[in-house]
């Protein structure tokens, strides 16, 4: 397989833009009636974030949203992937709890303004900021019967309020991370784990699998609702987004080839197989036995086929070797060191990420082979430059490792579409701006736009300029704008002025 650039371009309706999530950018956590999410208090507990910082201000995007949209518009993106904060819309989260009109109004205005600027909203309903009240009331994702109903009602409120203008919905972001990092390793909110030094409560051997099951069902019942009551009138698409990296066998020994398959069964198959094929992977049943909850036949009928597309968050490649005691990785050891001692690629600031663009191309084939996915939207992909947080701004803006990462990825994307014939319809680099990187606090920076947290000024990095230019040159002429032109434009019109806080946007 060659990874060289091919002369042809991506089709004219190819969608690209940048991605973010509500808790990572919004700040303003206690204004306009927002209720707490599980990340509010968790991030304030000593030791939970690397720099001890929380999401109270983040990139201040709840206040600076017009400036954010102006920058997106200057970048010339076709779309923007962002998430809604459940507890801004329903502060206490539950199906009998009141809806907050100010939360609805905020996102409604935001969506209108994106559309007025020719930017397609690509909306995630849930990106990890579960309402705290639901966790306190009944254990949140641990309580399947309650959470499914509450999530579906939340989804209904969003379809009713925004579905006339939103044509791309993602139900949930990365269920593996919610389950394993939140209820297994205990490093993400709500921080539950069997490790008593980390958490006074929790059972890492059972809870992640229960949580994953609840997430799948919540997703599936929300999709059923959309298809039955909204799709005909609103005409949108709805799916889930899964995290999953390419699993490459460490060498060609049969046990390591099998290990790569096992790694995938747990990292991707846990969610992809029920949703696209209608069953949990055999390997998961084998290692978990009774601990893996079962679906009733009625549930399975709702789960199977419950995604209109494959939402893929993919960052890296793992060399997989049989062994180890980590159930969350399917008893597979991950490494970036090849048998000959060389590194797979350039190391990012976070330990789990190296640059290996060939893996990006392979991951489409890997997923296609697994379940013959209909079509792909890459909803996240990106790189955090090592030590970027400690560099002076001028230096941080020269983000060569990130530029190289995206050079490799864009070539691989083009090859996947034009040479391998994979049906990829959208691509969203993570992230639009540096932001609250969960347990890493503000240390790890994934943005293509630098945020100076002292001033909240935004500065485009070289990688933003590279991507803007690349997509400008590599998509066939003609545009997807027809979609948003057709969409009704309600609500007040907001006039955007060229923001003063954005520096050097000559892209
Ligand atoms: C994703 N891992 O999270 C999330 O969707 C984003 O909110 C986040 O900012 C981004 O990737 C960068 O981290 C992940 O440990 C977190 O492999 C951790 C992992 C993968 C994805």
Image: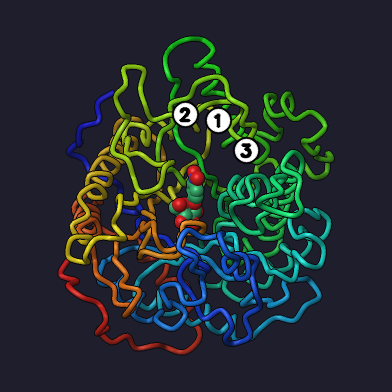
Answer left or right for 68 relative to 294.
Answer: left
Residue 303 location, x and y as percent? Answer: 71, 44
Q: CA distance from mark 1 to mark 3?
A: 15 Å
Outermost residue, front side = 197
Q: Position of residue 370 (x, y in %)?
A: 55, 28
Asked whether 410 or 121 is in front, the reply is: 410
Position of 274 relative to 190 (above/below): above
In this rendering, would 77 be left or right of 285? left
Q: Give the class, few, some or many, for how many residues have Cα within 10 Å of label 3's Cα (few <14, many ≥20).
A: many
For label 1, being within 8 Å of ligand 1 is answered no
- Helix or strand or loop: what does disc 3 sit on? helix
Dot 1, how many residues are within 10 Å of its Cα: few (below 14), some (14-19), or many (20+)? many
Which residue is painted at 61% across and 31% down in the image? 326
Q: Which residue is mark 3?
A: 276
Q: Position of residue 91 (x, y in %)?
A: 68, 78
Which comes before the other along the chain, label 3 or label 2?
2
Residue to which mark 1 is pinned = 264
The yes-or-no answer for disc 2 within 8 Å of ligand 1 is no
Question: Which residue is drawn at the image coordinates 62% and 80% (left, top)?
Answer: 34
Disc 2 marks which residue? 247
Contact? badges 1 and 2 (CB < 8 Å) = yes
Residue 130 vs residue 28: left or right?
Answer: right
């Amino acid at each position: 397989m060659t990874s060289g650039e091919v002369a042809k371009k991506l089709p004219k309706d190819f969608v690209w833009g940048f991605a973010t999530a509500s808790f990572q950018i919004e700040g303003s956590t206690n204004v306009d009636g927002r209720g707490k999410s599980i990340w509010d208090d968790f991030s304030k507990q000593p030791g939970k974030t690397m720099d001890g910082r929380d999401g109270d201000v983040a990139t201040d995007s709840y206040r600076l949203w017009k400036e954010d949209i102006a920058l997106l518009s200057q970048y010339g993106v076709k779309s923007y992937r962002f998430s809604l904060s459940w507890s801004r819309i329903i502060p206490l989260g539950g199906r009998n709890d009141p809806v907050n009109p100010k939360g609805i109004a905020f996102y409604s205005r935001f969506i209108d303004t994106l559309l007025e600027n020719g930017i397609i909203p690509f909306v995630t309903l849930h990106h990890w900021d579960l309402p705290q009240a639901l966790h306190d009331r009944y254990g949140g994702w641990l309580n399947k019967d309650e959470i499914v109903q509450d999530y579906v009602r939340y989804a209904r409120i969003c379809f009713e309020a925004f579905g006339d203008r939103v044509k791309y919905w993602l139900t949930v972001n990365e269920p593996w991370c919610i389950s394993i990092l939140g209820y297994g390793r205990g490093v993400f909110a709500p921080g539950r784990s069997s490790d008593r030094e980390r958490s006074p409560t929790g059972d890492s051997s059972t809870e992640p699998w229960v949580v994953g099951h609840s997430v799948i069902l919540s997703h599936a019942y929300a999709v059923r609702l959309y298809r039955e009551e909204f799709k005909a009138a609103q005409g949108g698409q709805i799916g889930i987004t899964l995290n999953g990296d390419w699993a490459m066998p460490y060498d060609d020994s049969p046990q390591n080839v099998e290990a790569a398959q096992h790694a995938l069964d747990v990292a991707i198959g846990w969610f992809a197989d029920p949703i696209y094929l209608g069953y949990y992977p055999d390997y998961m049943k084998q290692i978990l036995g009774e601990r893996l909850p079962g679906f009733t036949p009625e549930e399975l009928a709702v789960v199977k086929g419950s995604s209109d597309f494959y939402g893929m968050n993919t960052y890296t490649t793992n060399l997989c070797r049989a062994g180890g005691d980590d159930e969350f990785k399917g008893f597979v050891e991950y490494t970036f060191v090849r048998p000959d001692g060389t590194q797979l690629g350039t190391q990012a600031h976070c330990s789990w990420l190296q640059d290996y663009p060939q893996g990006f191309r392979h991951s489409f084939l890997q997923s296609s082979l697994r379940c013959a996915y209909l079509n792909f939207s890459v909803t996240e992909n990106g790189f955090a430059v090592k030590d970027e947080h400690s560099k002076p701004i001028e230096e941080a803006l020269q983000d060569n490792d990130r530029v190289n990462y995206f050079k490799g990825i864009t070539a691989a994307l083009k090859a996947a579409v034009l040479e391998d014939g994979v049906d990829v319809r959208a691509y969203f680099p993570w992230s639009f701006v540096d932001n609250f990187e969960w347990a890493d606090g503000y240390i790890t920076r994934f943005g293509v736009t630098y945020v100076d947290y002292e001033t909240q000024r935004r500065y485009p990095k070289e990688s933003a300029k590279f991507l803007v230019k690349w997509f400008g040159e590599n998509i066939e002429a003609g545009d997807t704008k027809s979609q948003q032109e057709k969409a009704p434009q309600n609500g007040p019109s907001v006039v955007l002025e060229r923001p003063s806080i954005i520096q050097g946007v000559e892209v």
